[in-house]
Image (cartoon, helix red, strand yellow):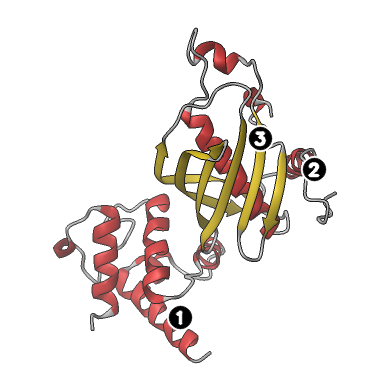
Amino acid sequence: MSSTFETVAEVISETSDIPVEEISPDAHAIDDLGIDSLDFLDVVFALDKKFGIKIPLEAWTQEVNEGKASVEDYFVLKNLCARIDELVAAKAAG
Amino acid sequence: MRLEYFEMIDAVQSIDTENGVIRTESRLPETSPVFDGHFPTYPILPGVMMLEIMNHAAGYLIYMRLKRERFVFLGGVKRAKFRRMVEPGATIITEARIDHDGSGFFVASSSVSVDGTTTADAEIVMIATDFPNDDLRREFERVSSGIRWPADMVHP
């Protein structure tokens, strides 16, 4: 069973045409990988389907805009994976 | 239907916001400046306008699903095929279905058909966000209330 990061890296590689070996846990999806907001929707769509969750992108964006969270909290891949794990756990808990 | 004003839908035949499906009807005008140029002596509906009709059908579905509170617009086209010519005066039936309800976006599949034959189909990404101003919100309400809705559906 692949890890959350491996799955996220595969999705980003497929949707954004980035070689998987260039995708690291410390990479910033926007600053390092150059994924723009519309391309990120494709990533989120694929991740929603892969993990059976609904990534709350609007709420995250609002938190960043209001200064309640940093962009890195959600868009550095290791942090994104941690958020995904939380959403998967919350879903499993019902 | 007024192509030049992007009023693409005449009637909603059926809509199920919970299950995410809609079926609409559009009667193409016999004449339009669009047909004058596309193409001279051989008027057919441009494929990009078939795409726009699918965009509007999916858009009305999502707009109503979100209780007319969000600004819905086309964000991307994942796939589109234009399979048949559509001539002036044709009655176009458009079906759209929500495939994915994401956070601030939707993925929908849609098709248009004439006389039971599919003329185009597409998979599109629709963005749903706050209205940028109240005037646009009112304009959305005005245009949507100007089309025919199913008799069992109350629409202001």
Report which residue position mark 1 lands on. Answer: A87
- How far apart are the two marked residues, 1 and 2, measured between alpha carbons? 39 Å
- Label 1 chain ID: A
Going by the numbered disc 3, the residue's amino acid type is Ser
Q: How many marks overall?
A: 3
Q: Are marks 2 and 3 in contact (CB under 8 Å)?
A: no
Residue drawn at 48 percent across, 31 percent down: B48
Question: In the drawing, does residue B128 fall left or right of residue A72?
Answer: right
Q: Nearer the viewer, mark 1 or mark 2?
A: 2
- How far apart are the two marked residues, 3 and 1, measured between alpha carbons? 42 Å
Report which residue position mark 3 lands on. Answer: B26
Q: Are marks 3 and 1 in contact (CB under 8 Å)?
A: no
Report which residue position mark 2 lands on. Answer: B145
Residue B69 location, quadrant: bottom right
Q: Residues within 10 Å of mark 2 (few under 14, many from 20)?
A: few
Residue A3 location, quadrant: bottom left
Residue drawn at 21 percent across, 64 percent down: A23
Q: Nearer the viewer, mark 2 or mark 3?
A: 3
Tell me the SS state at disc 3. Answer: strand
- The picture places residue B118, in percent across and down from the top left corner, at 49, 40
